[in-house]
Amino acid sequence: MYQSKIYVNDILNKMNHVFERFTYLSRSKSFKKEQVDQIDYHLNEIMKILNECN
């Protein structure tokens, strides 16, 4: 059980890092439409997985 707790923390840390990085970059540069589409696709996939857990 302890092992899954560490794993969940790792995922949360990565998600936080992604958010911080995206926020920082969006202030300093423009993303191409293809890049935004790719990011959106992956976030949607993550949300699908999380929604399955309800």
Image (tube, grey):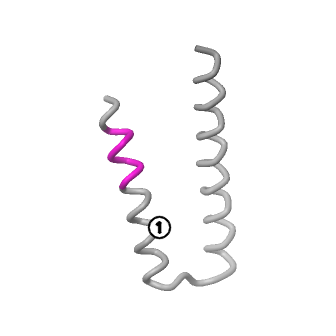
Our reading of the magenta stretch's main secondary structure is: helix
Quadrant of res 40: bottom left
Mark 1 Cα shell of 10 Å, populated few (<14), some (14-19), many (≥20): few
**Image position of 9 with respect to 20: above or below:** above
**Image position of 27 with respect to 1: above or below:** below
Q: Which residues are magenta?
A: 45-51
Q: Image point 43% across, 60% down: which residue?
A: 42
* In magenta segment, residue 46: yes
Q: Image point 54% across, 81% down: which residue?
A: 31
* In magenta segment, residue 30: no
Q: Image point 31% across, 29% down: which residue?
A: 54
Give the residue number, with chain letter if any, for mark 1.
39
**Image position of 31 with respect to 15: above or below:** below
Coordinates of residue 27 in the picture (x, y in percent)? 65, 75
Amino acid identity at mark 1: Ile
Please tell me which residue lies in front, 25 or 49: 49
